[in-house]
Image: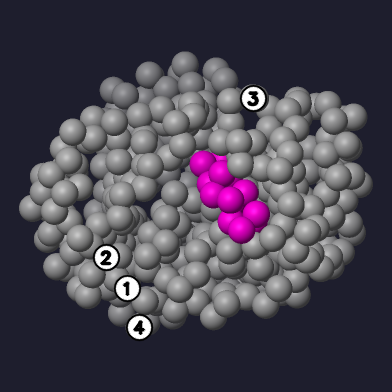
Amino acid sequence: MTNEVQTQKQIIYPGDTIGIIGEGFGGAQLVVTARSMGFRVVTYTTTEVNDMARYADFGMIGSLKDADKLRSFAERCKIVIYESEKVDLATLNYISRYTSVPQGTDLLEMAQDRVVEKAALQQMGVSVTTHATIVGLDDIYEAIQDMGYPSMLKPILKDPLHEQKMLIERQLDIPKANSLLNHGTYLLEPWDQDSREISITVVKNIDGREKFFPMVENIYQDNHLKETRVPVQLSSDQQNRIVESTSRISNNVNYAGIFSVVFYVNKNGITLKRLIPSIHRSHNVFDTATNVSVYEELLRALTGMRMIDIRLIEPSIMLNLNEEQLPQIRTQWLIKDNWHFKFYPRITNKRDPKRIGYVLAEGDNISALQEQIDNTDVW
C-alpha cells in the first residue's frame, strides 16, 4: 500500500521548494507558516478563488485528473504535503512518482472509508463504537434492535462537502432513509449525546518519532463544533488509555505528519470515534495554549528538522464564530483583554460559508474561562 518514494527521507532547507495540495481550511496558514520558515511554496488548487494560492510563491490551478499539470507541479517541489483529509488518493499516488510525499497515504486511505477505518482499528485491538453496515432498510430495522434510538446514519465514504447524514430517533424515521440508501452504502452508529468528545493530536516525523499535543475536549451545538478547550479533566487512567490506544495506531500505520484520534468518553468506558489525518479546526486552540503551533510542528516533522517538545503554557478555549455573531462580539472586542479574535481571509468558504473565524480565550483557570464565556451570551 505504501509507495517507496513516499517514505524516502528528504531534508528540506530554507530556499527549497515544497508543494502543498488539499484546499482544506488550514491551507492558507500552512503556506504562511512555511514561507515564514524560509521555504518557497508552490500550491496546487482546483479553483482560482482559494486562500492558499494568495499566499504562495507560485500557484498552479488545474484538475486533479490533469496528469501533465500534476507532474509539472510535483517536479517543481522537493516534497509535496497534503493538508486535507479529502485529497484524492489516486492524485497523491501519481504525484509520488515524481517527487516525495513524506506523509504516505496509509492513514489517509484508512480514514476516508468508515468501514475500512473501523475494521483496521479493531484489528489493532482498539475499541471502536458499535456499528453496522447498511445497504437497505431491512439492515436498519435489524441493527437498531441492538443499538436502540437515537442512531446516526452516515455514508461509508467521508465527504464534508456533500455527505448526508440522518438521525434516526424512532421507528417511523427509518423509511425516510430510503432516499439516502439509493446513493450508496451507509454506516449506522448509536448517537450518544451524553458522551464527552476527547481528542488527542500527534505529530510524527519521517524517522517515526512522535510528539503529542495536550488532549482537548470538543463541544458541539447543532452538530457543529462550537468550542474546543484545553486542558481536559480526565482521570490518569483515562488519559493513559487514550495515549496507549493512540500510540498503538501510530505504531501500526506507515505515516508521517499530523493526525488526531477522537474518542467518546462516558460512564461505560472509552471508545474511538474517528481518525483525522490532517489539520482540523479544533487545532486552532493550540495557537495560545501551547509553545508551538500545529503548522510549524507539522512542517518541522516533514522537512527533517527536530520537532519541538510540546508544552501547555496557558489554559485556552477556542470558540468558532459565525456571521450572525459578529454584532454580538462588538462589546467583547472592546473589553476582553484575554481574548484573541481571528478572522479567516474573505474567500469563499465552501464547507461553511457562514463561518468567519474564531475567538481564543486564555487564562489561568479553565472553569473561570468557561464562566466568562457563558456570561457573554454570544454562544
Of the numbered discs 2 and 4, the one sitting upstream in the chain is 4
Instruction: Name the quarter where the C terminus is drawn.
Output: top left
Where is residue 56 drawn, in percent x and y? Answer: 67, 42
Give the alpha-carbon distance from disc 1 to disc 2, as whole Å: 6 Å
Identify the magenta region: 24-36
Residue highlighted by disc 4: 236
Contact between labelled residues 2 and 1, with CB atoms less than 8 Å apart: yes
Of the numbered discs 1 and 4, the one sitting upstream in the chain is 4
Query: In front: mark 2 or mark 4?
Result: 2
Residue at the extreme left of the image, as rendered: 375
Q: Quadrant of residue 74?
A: top right
Task: Please say if 316 is above or below 93.
Answer: below
Of the numbered discs 3 and 4, the one sitting upstream in the chain is 3
* Within-10-Å neighbours for mark 3: few <14, some 14–19, many 20+: few
Residue highlighted by disc 2: 362
Looking at the rendered structure, the secondary structure element under dot 4 is helix
Of the numbered discs 2 and 3, the one sitting upstream in the chain is 3
Give the alpha-carbon distance from disc 1 to disc 4, as whole Å: 20 Å
Of the numbered discs 1 and 2, the one sitting upstream in the chain is 1
